[in-house]
Amino acid sequence: MPATLSQQIQQFYDTSSGLWEQVWGEHMHHGYYGPTGQQAKPRRQAQIDLIEELLAWGEVQQPQKILDVGCGIGGSSLYLAQKYKAQVTGITLSPVQADRAQARAREAELSAQSDFRVADAQHMPFPDASFDLVWSLESGEHMPDKTQFLQECCRVLKPGGLLLVATWCHRPTPPALSWGEQRLLNDIYRVYYLPYVISLPGYADIAQTLPLSGLQTADWSTAVAPFWDEVITSALDLQVLIGILKAGLQTLQGALALSFMSRGYRQGLIRYGLLKGTKT
């Protein structure tokens, strides 16, 4: 039987996360290169700067219970736990990622402040009103039902809690996506196991149906676009190439597709969208 999308996502991250951490570190997300994308900086610093810029844009205060939806190996989860002295829960579809995140928490002496588990973001195993910050850093693109994803994020938020989402999008429509644009998107979907992406206005439309106030969106495509060229350059190192080959076919396909994302940003097709709102 063919694997389900969830199984494909799990397998992709099970096999690729170790190599990513070895080569690129614990943060499995874009970097921030200034509002115009012109600031030169090490890639890891750019990734940390993205977290800080998101927190500033979200006007995050002092959350004490944080949910990291799509936590990877705990990069941003542990950063937030340490920054805010908060209790952070991270969820991922990948048991390998959850185990590594727990190990990293122990290494950082943050086990008492963190919990990582395998869970589906569209069916979260948490009671209503459990968290005062729901943080989703580049996981929305993996969700088969964007509406259910945001509904679940909202459900587990406490009244007065903040939802802060950063996700891959396609450009606003109209005009309709061209055949060439859709073909490029399909290539990206195939190698990164994405069901589909929507536009940032599409996310805003969904959010307007939820009990959220103070809704705001922002497009940071220009600020993050240099990230993919940085990753492509580093992937050309011989030892990295050997690691990619050893990691297996899924990881190799993902590496070969780095140029798809770079091209998508250059063409204005791929957009980096932000959404925030406060639970009423």
Image (cartoon, rainbow, N blue to C red):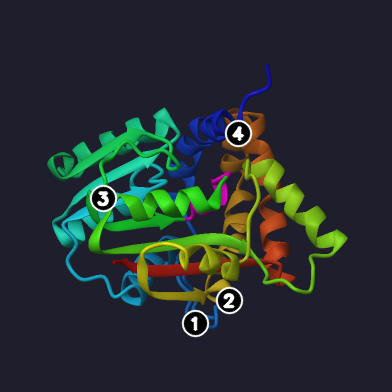
Q: Which residue is mark 1?
A: 35
Indicate which disc, 2 or 3, sits on the residue closer to the N terminus.
3
Task: Find residue 161 and report its image quarter.
Answer: bottom left
- State yes or no: discs 2 and 1 in contact (Cβ < 8 Å): yes
User: Within 10 Å of the Cα at label 3, are there few (<14), some (14-19), or many (20+) other Cα atoms?
Assistant: many
Q: What's the residue at 46%, 62% (across, down)?
A: 166
> Residue under circle 2?
222
Quadrant for residue 76, please give it: bottom left
Report the side of 173 relative to 20 (left or right): right
Mark 4 or 2 closer to N-term? Answer: 4
Q: Which quadrant, please, contains the C terminus?
A: bottom left
Q: Is residue 49 positioned above or below 17 on the image?
A: below
- Residue at 25 percent across and 41 percent down: it is 127
Q: Amino acid at mark 1?
A: Pro
Q: Position of residue 224 (x, y in %)?
A: 53, 69
Label at residue 78: 3
Judged from the image, the secondary structure of the residue bearing numbered disc 2 is helix
Query: Real-space Cα distance between discs 4 and 2?
Result: 30 Å
| Dot 4 amino acid type | Leu
Instruction: Please name the residue that numbered disc 4 is placed on.
Output: 5
- Indicate the secondary structure of the residue bearing disc 1: loop
Q: CA distance from mark 3 to mark 4?
A: 28 Å
- Report the front residue among 182 and 132: 132
